[in-house]
Amino acid sequence: MVRAKSHLVGTAFVAFGFAVAMMGTTLPTPLYPLYNRAFNLAPVLTPVIFATYALGVVATLLFFGYLSDEIGRRPVMLAALGLSAASAVTFLFARGLAALLVGRVLSGLSAGIASGTATAWLVDLAGRRGKQHATLLAVAANIGGLALGPLVAGLLAGLAPAPLRLPFVADLALLAPALLGVLVAPQPLALPQPHIALRMQSMRVPPEVSDIFPPAATVGVCAFAVAGVFSAVAPEFLGNELGDKSAVRAGLLVFLFFAMATAGQLTVNRIPKRLGLALGCVVLLVGLALLAAALAARSAALLFLSAAVSGLGEGLPVGFGLGAINEKVGDKRGETDSAYFVLLYCGVALPVVGVGFVALAVGMVTAGLLFCGLVGLCVLGVLYTLRRRSA
């Protein structure tokens, strides 16, 4: 009973630390238009700044995704929170583009370390019988933290003084208890003698998940691409195309997307597993259609509606995909989860930058419509594959 209670408290501490780390990665989202005006930056730089975060995530997952399997979850998670604090300090004292890029790289390193490590730690604490619930909690903490970032930053930037400083002061205040919680959380995983040997992570899929990994990763990449567009481009569209420069409404837009993505995670256990990925594909397709309609009509109402539906369409396939992978994977859970997130964060970086540069040539609306069409075709391909497999 005492051990079970200790694991329950530890689960809460790890989930809180995970959520705070991820919150720090989306704090700048509603602030990008403010940074553009304060530092006289071109709007096209917003996707580039955002992409440096995603590239930092990918680099960290490639070189350190396996590390928590070898030296333990706690020291790696402490490093993730430390990098998150360093990112917040960099943004707090930012005076130009260079600081923004450095801050985003640091937050990317933090997210990359935290994603695989915290997910694996939560599954460790749950034991074999609780794998599915632990995975659900991990994805909810991940996306829930992403949702809180723009909400907190947007409200503080729009309703309080020092809009480019106060959000990061609040972030540092939350990181202090997160660090303490990770320090006392138990580590049930038995580890070999700790050692560190820097190597690039293998991207080979373990045999036990070779059937589910490809469709889960593909639709996950598409879902994260949509998340990247809403995080980096949607606030700019709201301000430049619709004339709404409110940091509060920009934050609410991105919060709505990630809040609905979190809601999607909470419904995963209520939907039959055999239908999960397919249903996620259908909802994501509806969200993309609404986003295309919002762009074509230049409608703020449709933009917010598309954020809600697309968020749900992001949460469902990622939750089902990661749950299916963790249910089957063996001892290399941290490494496998990190490989999954490597692919997903590539989906964040490359399309967002592409949309930004295509927008220079043909305009933001046309670039957004092309994005919706291409991602929609990829999701349709996954849906077709799943239907053939089911048949």
Image (cartoon, rainbow, N blue to C red):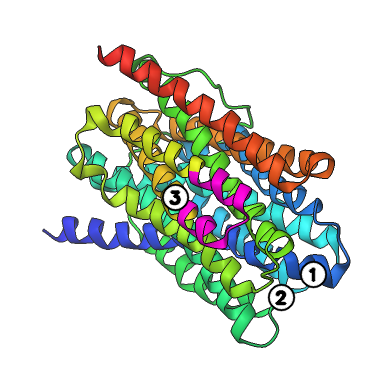
Residue 210 coordinates in the image, percent (x, y): 39, 16
The residue that mark 2 highlights is 164
Give the magenta-colored segment's residue range: 290-306
Q: Is 283 on the left or on the right of 307, as rendered?
A: left
Q: Quadrant of the N terminus?
A: bottom left
Q: CA distance from mark 1 to mark 2?
A: 9 Å
- Residue at the far right in the pictured view: 40
SS of the residue under disc 1: loop
Q: Quadrant of the C terminus?
A: top left
Q: Earlier in the sequence, mark 1 or mark 2?
A: 1
**Amino acid tagged 1:** Ala
Q: What is the crowding at mark 1: few (fewer than 14 residues within 10 Å), some, or many (at least 20)?
A: some
The residue that mark 1 highlights is 94
Vertical placement of residue 111 versus 148, above or below: above
Residue 275 coordinates in the image, percent (x, y): 25, 30
Whether residues under marks 1 and 2 lie with C-beta atoms below 8 angstroms apart, the answer is yes
Q: Earlier in the sequence, mark 3 or mark 1?
A: 1
